[in-house]
Image: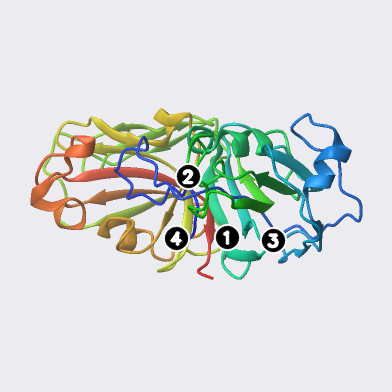
Amino acid sequence: MPPVFGLTLPPANSYRTISASAVLLVALTACSSDDPAPSSNGSDSSDATATFPDISGEVGQTPTVEFSGDPEVESVETLVVTNGTEGTVASDDLVASHQVIYERGPDGHVRETYSSFDEAPLLISVADLAEAAPEAAEAFEGEEVGTRLAMAFPPSHSALSPDPGGTGGAGEEDTSSLFVYDIVDRYQAGATVDQEEEEAVFDGDGELPDVRVPQGQQPRVTVPDTEPPEELITVTLIDGEGEPATAGATVVTQFHALTWDDGVEFDSTWEYGASPKNFALEPSSVIEGWLDGLEGVQSGSRVMLTVPPESGYGSGGNEAVDVGPDETLVYVIDIVDVLPPA
């Protein structure tokens, strides 16, 4: 289980629930630096550098970390190892990242406890990270894609235990932690697929919902006063030309969801600052209507899914988002990106 504050939730769960485990950040850009940059947390760069081991290698590739001596980590320290140049991370972004974590015991022994570098990048909301590990969120904000960061956490205060009175990452009183993060990509709040018209319009002809999407805004959906379709229906509103969504892939989305019977919104990324949300296309993460309805849909597409109860929340509904039993669901989804399975 990767130690990350991840948001891989079914597309109808409350985003106020965060799965907690640890921190994160990115890689894909191949840039490196021989000399460490000044610390981004305002401390003197020479003092911060003394806290850290020698870290080298290209961003996006597993770093080489050479520990020497026995530096005492007395406070949370941040060091920019490599400066990126590809777009500034903001507080409401969804960030793609790689990370590697080391723990150092009181006897100087170092062990690697986790690495994502041989897997797909991790995705995390900076806003949610700010609640779980504020020092990490502060370190990420304002940095560019392509940046490599290092963070050192003293005993009893790590990214696994943001509270200074916590128990520390390894559960050992004298164990400090080193996190190395590569920032490989970012998805800005309000990100949508390309839309040529000032307002894109779909006419459901009285059988399917009508959809109007003003440029860069939340979709406006009008459900017809008719019986809902009995089968799953996927309508392509905008054709993308990117990577197709397949089983096991991760989709980065903006979406708006409502129930057919009363046309009431029950979930929407737009209600959470329009920060894109990511979902793995697997049964443990999304409803069947998403698994089947998004199969083969290419990145850059906008689709409307009309999901019958058996492909949604069935006879039990979903109390967490006020979806009752046997509800037909309507989703308008922008597939901002598709990340194939690792």
Mark 2 neighbour class, 10 Å CA radius: few under 14, some 14 to 19, many 20 or more: some
Secondary structure at numbered mark 2:
loop
Residue at image x 18%, y 34%? 322
Please name the residue that numbered disc 1 is placed on.
242
> What amino acid does circle 2 point to?
Thr
**Earlier-in-chain disc, 4 versus 1:** 1
**Residue at mark 2:** 167
Look at the image and tell me whether residue 158 can be seen: yes
Quadrant assignment for the C terminus: bottom right
Under mark 1, the amino acid is Gly
Q: Quadrant of the N terminus?
A: bottom left
Say which residue label 4 marks. Answer: 297
Taking the image as shown, residue 240 lies to the left or right of residue 327, namely right
Residue at position x 9%, y 44% from top? 325
SS label for mark 1: loop
Image position of 295 with respect to 215: above or below: below
> Disc 3 on helix, strand or loop?
loop
Question: Residue 169: x and y, percent?
Answer: 52, 51
| Location of residue 91 in the rendering, given as x and y in whole percent from the top left corner | 59, 31
Looking at the image, tell me whether mark 3 or mark 1 is earlier in sequence order: 3
For badge 3, the amino acid type reads Gly
Q: Nearer the viewer, residue 221 or 20?
A: 20
Q: Position of residue 292 (x, y in %)?
A: 31, 63
Q: Are marks 2 and 4 in contact (CB under 8 Å)?
A: no
Spatial CA span between label 3 and label 1: 48 Å
SS at mark 4 in the image: loop
Inter-mark Cα distance, 4 to 1: 9 Å
Q: Is residue 267 above or below residue 243?
A: above
Residue 339 x/y as whole percent: 54, 61
Amino acid type at circle 4 is Val
